[in-house]
Amino acid sequence: MSSPRATPASARDLARVEAANATGRIPVVFVHGLWLLPTSWDRWATVFEQAGFAPVLPGWPDDPDTVEEAHAHPEAFAGKSVGQVADHFCDLIGRLDRKPVVIGHSFGGLITQITAGRGLSQASVAIDPAPFRGVLPLPLSSLRAASAVLANPANYHRAVPLTFDQFRYAFANAVGEEEARELYGTFAVAAPGEPLFQAAAANLNPWTEAKVDTRTADRGPLLIVSGENDNTVPWAIANAAYKKQAQNEHAVTEITEVPGRGHSLTIDSGWQEVADTALTFVRRFVDPTT
């Protein structure tokens, strides 16, 4: 049953769910973060499909289909909250015939943990996940990375693009200049400001939507992946999330750090290493042949 707050699923996302159901395989739902689109997971989808899973790449509510369309209509990203996006993905997961694996990056990693906390996933991988209530560290690099949005309170309701320099610092600091420009041109789109304000104030707001049920009995195994050189979600944040999640007595919780990698680790030239790390973890707990 759909959540009363869930945004109606698009025909595109419903088609993706139906395609996964038609395979009879265990789905893997990929959840992108801010400033990216579902197409950022295309290469990952191929890896997991070849491993026997049925990849599902939904968008956030109102996501354009392409980067070109996103650049033409950046206003489409405005006005999306953490709760709205989480309910959107939970609604789509509820339409799957089989309980999925969920993999998310950045704010997608936060959404991944929310869905796990609702008992909706067989296994979960949260890559450089955005913080939730109870995750206390707030490193200076994170504040600088988020300043493109947080510096102006009016951005709360806006869609905010990153300049190349902002993208270079927040995402592509661990790759060369040429690759950074290629990533920016290929993947970067505008993003809603509201989730960043929600995450920044999560520990001050007991009613925040940026919260995770870390103790639910049916959370399933969870891996947190941290890029060693990530400016946006450095080790201090990822490890604090791990420590909260590790208090769950019912499920495996693990964390791993990928050396020399920044926030672009899911899309840059080293993406395969991270995808293989996630797949190895998932295969320990989920058999795609069953």
Image: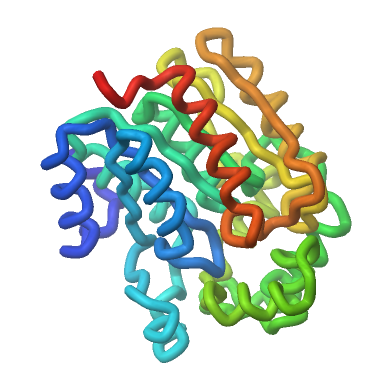
Q: Is residue 158 left or right of residue 235?
A: left
Residue 209 seen anywhere in this rendered image of the structure: no
Q: Residue furthest top?
A: 249
Drawn side of residue 285 relative to residue 223, left or right:
left
Colouring style: rainbow
Residue at 28% in and 41% down: 54
Left or right: residue 32 versus residue 244 is left
Above-or-below relation of 110 to 174: above
Can you tell which quarter of the image residue 94 is in? top left
Please tell me which residue is depicted at 74% across the width and 76% down the height of the picture.
Answer: 166
Q: Quadrant of residue 145?
A: bottom right
Left-right relation of 105 to 23: right
Q: Residue at x 68, y 33 (%)?
A: 241
| Location of residue 233 in the rendering, given as x and y in whole percent from the top left corner | 73, 50
The image shows residue 250 at horizontal and vertical percentages of: 51, 9
**In the picture, which quadrant includes the C terminus?**
top left
Q: Is residue 20 visible?
A: yes
Count the labels in the image. 0
Which residue reaches farthest right? 140
> Image height check: is 155 above or below 276?
below
Along the line of sight, the residue nearer the viewer: 228 or 116 = 228
Of residues 47 and 21, the one drawn nearer to the viewer in this rendering: 47
Residue most toward the bottom?
Answer: 72
Quadrant for the N terminus in the image: top left
Q: Position of residue 217 (x, y in %)?
A: 45, 13
